[in-house]
Image (spheres, grey):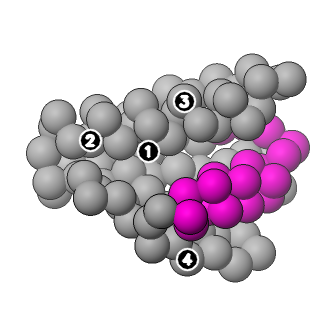
Amino acid sequence: MKISESRVETQNAGRYLAQLCKHFAHKLPVELDDTVGSIAFSIGICRLEAQPAALLMRCESPDAAALDQLQTVIADHVARFGWREAPEIVWRSR
């Protein structure tokens, strides 16, 4: 399993968590509570955690190509939802 993580510094972590999960819930299996969520894609899973000053994102996929695709999907949506603050998303392999 290939894994990458990103810590997005933001005061809006809870809002991004809810937006991401609700957006994808129309098409994919999603779990969501106040501070954590997960989105199950066909190419892998994204686990999210809202902290007071950051959104933690962890992507897990069976191979590097799927991981790259999953990272791109998640990063594009976070950037779109957070266009006002232009969040910096840097993925780190684990």
What separation in Å lies between label 1 and label 3 (alpha carbons)?
15 Å
Image quadrant containing the N terminus: bottom left
Quarter-of-image position of residue 65 = top left
What separation in Å lies between label 1 and label 4 (alpha carbons)?
19 Å
Quick check: marks 4 and 2 in contact, CB under 8 Å?
no
State the image coordinates of residue 36 (x, y, percent, origin top left). Answer: 63, 70
Mark 1 or mark 2, which is nearer the start of the sequence?
1
In front of the other: 43 or 7: 43
As displayed, is residue 6 above or below residue 87?
below
As displayed, is residue 79 above or below residue 49?
above
Q: Dot 3 corresponds to which residue?
A: 76
Q: Dot 1 corresponds to which residue?
A: 5
Which mark lies nearer to you, 2 or 1? 2
What's the residue at 43%, 45% (across, down)? 5
Q: Secondary structure at mark 2?
A: helix
Query: Badge 3, how many Cα within 10 Å: few under 14, some, many 20+?
Result: few
What's the residue at 84%, 46% (across, down)? 12
User: What label sits on residue 31 in the rendered view?
Assistant: 4
What separation in Å lies between label 2 and label 1 (alpha carbons)?
11 Å
Mark 2 or mark 4, which is nearer the start of the sequence?
4
State the image coordinates of residue 29 (x, y, percent, origin top left). Answer: 45, 73
Which mark lies nearer to you, 2 or 3? 3
